[in-house]
Image (cartoon, rainbow, N blue to C red):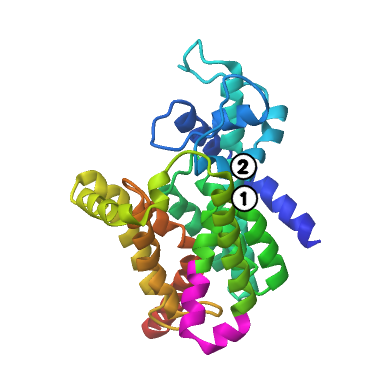
Amino acid sequence: MPLIRACLGFAGLALLLNPLFFVILRLAAFNTVPHDDYAPYLLWLLGTPPGFFPDSPFCYRILSVAAAVPFYVAMPVLRLTNLPADMPAELIRANQAMSAVAFCAWIVGTMAIFACARRLGLRRGDSVLAGGLLGVLGLYVQYTSIDAPLIALIAGGVALLHRPGWFALLVILGSAANEKLGMVLAVWLTLRCLTSAEDRRLLWRQWAAASLACALYVAVVAVLRFPGNAWQHDPAAFLPTLAANLALYLSPRGVALNLLPMLVLAGLAVFGHAGRAPAPFRRTDLLMLAALPGIGLVLAEGWQAGRLAMFAAPIFVIPAVAAARDWLAATGDHAA
């Protein structure tokens, strides 16, 4: 029954949010927003021109691209208005398939947070709000690329935190879809285990699984050594990258893409932990607001710190909704 209800819920949301798929597809096909384009990678995977194998680190995210293969095979070509007449049909189908993965992942991520919130005792309406809030925060990342699947995987990790075996399977396999899955969860659980003896007792297996996922990724990169982003493996480049990224914060684009997302997430996070957040969340989680942007400033070039910070959104939406529920209840009691 839970599986049937989940399938029905997914189908219902897919029908309701159907226009969102076309929004994602248009933004991707017309390349109207900055995003990493994985459509040629999908064509390479299928052995279809004009596909090509991308540089590191994009080439290691193969499962995110492989997930689009069924959509590529099943979907007809949708020639959008004003698309270039000479755009190959194969490239159109690849954009459709990658957009379908992002669209489905968007739904799956909201459903994972909904299920987690229900398990933690939130009412159905509050749980729906938590899932919807995650969907809104997903607009701050590259939702036309593979960031939506990453957020869905992180949300799945949060939902499965109480199931060490399933959590380990998700984080280790999911890191082949996006290595940042292991990184985000490993940072989160490292902070928790460093600051709480209870968390060390309850979460050490989950921490070990996330750390192993990170170690496996580093080992794969060290063995395969595909070209691209070599500076990320050179400690001497970290400080110059940090200085260059901090300078970007002074630009209007830096404010929009870095500071604004971090302020939005920080506001929700602080509000959610002002009182007593529902277990398994702790105030220690607020350290993620500094840890993830810090990693982005050192290891990513350009306007990436705000985007990286937003990958922690699945950790903060449930406490934020629970705090809003408590605040509204207290306000109602006071008014009465």
In the image, residue 330 sits, relative to residue 221, either above or below, namely below
* Quadrant (top left, top right, bottom left, bottom right) of the C terminus: bottom left
- Magenta stretch prevailing secondary structure: helix
| Classed neighbour count for the residue bearing mark 2: other residues with Cα under 10 Å, few (<14), some (14–19), many (≥20) | some
- Front in this rendered view, residue 294 or 111: 294
Residue for badge 1: 176
- Residue 121 position within the rendered picture, expressed as x and y whole percent measured from the top left: 61, 76
Comes first in the chain, label 1 or label 2:
2
- Front in this rendered view, residue 329 or 225: 225
In the image, residue 101 sits, relative to residue 188, either above or below, namely above
Q: Residue at x 39, y 73 (%)?
A: 287
Residue for badge 2: 62
Amino acid carrying label 2: it is Ile
Disc 2 is placed on an element classified as: helix
Residue that protrudes farthest toward the top in the picture: 86
- Front in this rendered view, residue 330 or 149: 149
Direction from residue 9 to residue 226 in the image, left or right: left
How much space separates mark 1 and mark 2, taking CA atoms?
6 Å
Q: Which quadrant would residue 126 be assigned to in this image? A: bottom right
Residue 197 drawn in magenta: yes
Q: Which quadrant would residue 166 be assigned to in this image? A: bottom right
Disc 1 is placed on an element classified as: loop
Amino acid carrying label 1: it is Ala
Residue 38 drawn in magenta: no
Q: Which quadrant would residue 41 be assigned to in this image? A: top right
In the image, residue 199 sits, relative to residue 171, either above or below, namely below
The magenta segment? 187-202
Whether residues under marks 1 and 2 lie with C-beta atoms below 8 angstroms apart, the answer is yes
Q: Residue at x 51, y 10 (%)?
A: 86
